[in-house]
Amino acid sequence: MHWPLSSQGVLFIRIIFLGIVISFCYDIMRFFRKIIPHRFYVMQIEDVFYWLSAVFVVFTFFIRESYGEIRLFSVLALLSGMLGYFFFLSPGFMKICDIPAQHIRNTFLKSGILMNVFIKKHRHLYRNEKNILHFRGKYAKIKVRKK
């Protein structure tokens, strides 16, 4: 299919922007990993799902915008958008995200500590049935009525 040069330039810019958006979404996922640390295999599973969805988005973009034609300039535009974001914008974004991530994580830790203290303090309420009836050092006597 023959395209005019101006539409190819517009497509090139749109694909660069798509690479930037894909990389930004990955940084959002990295931000949430800073809040809630994950095990290595969980991070790998998240990455697999992320990249599968990114491939689906890129594939859909190519089908919709360039009628399924994958050209060398479009692949280079996608890579340049992603690499440009990761080298120039991502370090600043992650540095900015460190402060709120640390604050949110500390808030979660403090609330978890408070919940742990509350549970330890009121453990006697749910330990066994006999202690539920405990009040001021005395146990209630339960009388069973005979029929």
Image: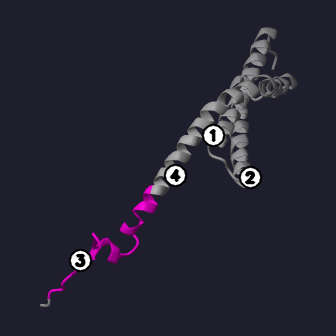
Of pointers 3 and 4, the one earlier in the residue sequence: 4
- Please rate how many residues cluster around mark 4, counting C-alpha atoms within 10 Å: few if below 14, some from 14 to 19, many from 20: few
User: Image quadrant for the C terminus?
Assistant: bottom left
Of pointers 3 and 1, the one earlier in the residue sequence: 1
Task: Estimate the spatial distance between the alpha carbons at disc 1 and disc 2, rounded to whole Å.
Answer: 15 Å
Q: Is residue 140 magenta?
A: yes
Q: Which residue is mark 3?
A: 140
Q: Label 4 amino acid?
A: Ile
Of pointers 3 and 2, the one earlier in the residue sequence: 2
Q: Label 1 amino acid?
A: Phe
Q: Looking at the image, do the residues carrying marks 1 and 4 touch, with CB atoms under 8 Å apart?
A: no
Disc 1 element:
helix
Looking at this view, name the residue that lies furthest to the right. 72
User: Which stretch did the figure color magenta?
Assistant: 118-145
Q: Which residue is mark 2?
A: 40
125 sits to left or right of 94: left
Q: Which residue is mark 4?
A: 113
